[in-house]
């Protein structure tokens, strides 16, 4: 699993990346009440806001960690947004993306580097 | 770490010790949540929530001309207000715009005790003082903290500390010895629930806060839930739902315009307000139940059934009690009829919204039958 400074995680299997937000991000947001995930077929570029997560207080963008095409948004989050709090790095995934350049993941942090990064915030 | 540009209340260290997440609000470093907004919201609706609202401005207005002078700025009849009662009112400009909303009452026999919003207090008190006349004096009570205890169990909790509080009806107020110190108390609040607001000496706030939290029915509640509670109760937030460009007629706050004062038309903005009452207004505050999609928040556009933009949301979000998204905003009066089908536009997507009655969630104030 790899991590971004914006607190997304990415798990690559073949050329498909599953993307979500980290435990740290989910805890910081507090109670998630609404999630908007992208439709299949949507082209995304690294850094684009491609999903939205809303707590009671505010809406926050979730940024695409890699370039690619969305294969599937996690439809289960529309009826159970609280899954993002309960299992952010598992069932609370946001989307699966067919990556166009797997090399982009090399620039992301591994778990140890991300944990270190959190201590600097 | 405290942001050094923010002011703190006497309870700041206590909030941090209890693990609150702190944010800047109204120029103060305040707790936005403790265990979570949803849990705190529900706790207040079911039990009793304790809020630190010491950031709000407290003042005493005294002198033989105190009430007459204060009335020049507000549309409520404070001459007729009985001792032991308080009244919601509005600080108005000459155009009838709302500079702030406030509570003012007669807790003792020494003028008025006033509570105004944190972000406006310096401007409010400066505005009032700039127009002082006659035998009237405004004293800012910045040596006091303000606590609110709200919820269906608040009365039982408070009765244990002072039995006479059980006798209070909604909007009753008194200055009395409570927790061994000199307090101003009123049966009122900003959540739609029964409860009390208690002004205590700043030096005693920490002790009283901890004492109240010893009761298992009471939990500390942050400003996050305070906002969702007041939204459900349909109560406007100054700077968002009402401001200097909004009048009480537009905002649906005409209950704050006393009949006698409208007739005398002797307060700031009276002419503009009486004209609006006679001729109507171009926009009014409405309550919207968002029937699909994302929460519609402040700034979201409101459109008619054809998609024409007719107004804006001034506050909105999820209602934990209803399990639905709710919002308040302004639209032309012809779109304000209950049951009207409108749209709210969130991130470019129109979602169906229905005009509903305020409040969204029934208020449960402790109103005593009129004697």
Image (cartoon, coloured by chain):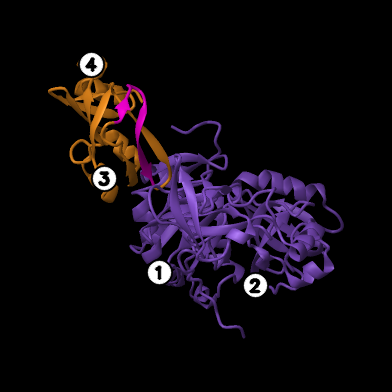
Q: Are marks 1 and 4 on the same chain?
A: no
Which chain does the numbered disc 1 sit on? B
N-terminal of the pair, mark 4 or mark 3, is: 3
**Residue lying farthest to the left in this orientation:** A14
Q: Are marks 2 and 3 in contact (CB under 8 Å)?
A: no
- Residue at 52% in and 62% down: B340
Residue B267, magenta (yes or no): no
| Left or right, A108 with reference to B33 | left
Same chain for mark 2 and mark 1? The answer is yes
Which residue in the protein does label 4 denote? A101
Say which of marks 3 and 1 sits in front.
3
Is residue B14 shown to the viewer in this render?
no
Helix or strand or loop: what does disc 4 sit on? loop
Residue toward you, B266 or B46: B266
Q: Is residue A52 magenta?
A: yes
* B77 to the left or right of B2: right
Q: CA distance from mark 2 to mark 3?
A: 52 Å
SS at badge 3: helix
C-alpha separation, residue under disc 2 versus residue under disc 1: 23 Å
* Chain letter, orange in picture: A
Is the C-beta separation of discs 2 and 4 under 8 Å?
no
Are there few (<14), some (14-19), or many (20+) residues within 10 Å of tag 1?
A: many
Span colored in magenta:
A42-55
The mark found on residue A77 in the picture is 3
Q: Colour of chain B?
A: purple
Mark 1 or mark 4, whichever is nearer to me = 4
Disc 1 is placed on an element classified as loop
Q: Are marks 2 and 4 on the same chain?
A: no
């Amino acid at each position: 699993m790899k991590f971004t400074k914006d607190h997304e995680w990415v798990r690559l299997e073949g050329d498909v990346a599953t993307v979500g937000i980290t435990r740290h991000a989910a805890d910081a947001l507090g109670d998630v009440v609404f999630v908007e995930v992208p439709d299949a077929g949507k082209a995304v570029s690294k850094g684009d806001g491609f999903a939205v997560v809303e707590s009671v207080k505010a809406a926050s963008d979730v940024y695409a960690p890699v370039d690619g095409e969305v294969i599937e948004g996690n439809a289960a989050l529309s009826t159970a947004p609280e899954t993002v709090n309960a299992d952010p790095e598992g069932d609370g995934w946001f989307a699966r993306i067919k990556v166009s350049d797997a090399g982009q993941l090399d620039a992301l942090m591994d778990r140890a580097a991300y944990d270190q990064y959190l201590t600097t915030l | 770490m405290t942001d050094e540009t923010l002011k703190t209340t006497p309870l700041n260290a206590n909030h941090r010790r209890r693990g609150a997440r702190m944010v800047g609000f109204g120029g103060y470093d305040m707790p936005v949540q403790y265990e979570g907004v949803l849990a705190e919201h529900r706790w207040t609706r079911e039990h009793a929530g304790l809020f630190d609202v010491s950031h709000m401005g407290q003042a005493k207005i005294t002198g033989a001309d105190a009430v007459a002078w204060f009335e020049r700025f507000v549309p409520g009849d404070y001459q007729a207000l009985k001792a032991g009662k308080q009244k919601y009112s509005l600080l108005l400009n000459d155009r009838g715009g709302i500079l702030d909303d406030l509570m003012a009452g007669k807790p003792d026999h020494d003028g008025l005790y006033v509570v105004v919003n944190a972000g406006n207090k310096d401007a409010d008190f400066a505005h009032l003082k700039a127009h002082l006349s006659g035998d009237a004096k405004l004293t800012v009570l910045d040596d006091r903290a303000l606590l609110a205890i709200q919820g269906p169990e608040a009365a039982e909790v408070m009765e244990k500390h002072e039995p006479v509080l059980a006798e209070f009806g909604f909007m009753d107020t008194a200055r009395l010895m409570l927790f061994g110190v000199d307090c101003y108390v009123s049966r009122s609040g900003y959540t739609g629930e029964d409860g009390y607001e208690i002004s205590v000496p700043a030096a005693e706030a920490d002790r009283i806060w901890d004492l109240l939290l010893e009761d298992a029915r009471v939990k500390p509640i942050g400003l996050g839930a305070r906002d969702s509670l007041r939204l459900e109760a349909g109560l406007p937030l100054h700077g968002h739902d009402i401001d200097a460009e909004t009048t009480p007629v537009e905002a649906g706050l005409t209950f704050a315009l006393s009949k006698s004062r409208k007739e005398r038309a002797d307060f700031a903005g009276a002419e503009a307000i009486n004209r609006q009452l006679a001729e109507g207004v171009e926009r009014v505050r409405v309550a919207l139940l968002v029937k699909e999609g994302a929460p519609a928040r402040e700034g979201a556009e409101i459109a008619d059934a054809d998609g024409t933009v007719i107004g804006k949301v001034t506050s909105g979000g999820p209602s934990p009690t209803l399990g639905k998204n709710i919002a308040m905003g302004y639209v032309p009066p012809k779109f304000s009829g209950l049951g009207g089908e409108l749209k709210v536009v969130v991130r470019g997507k129109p979602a169906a919204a229905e005009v509903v009655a305020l409040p969204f969630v029934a208020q449960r104030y402790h109103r005593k039958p009129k004697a």
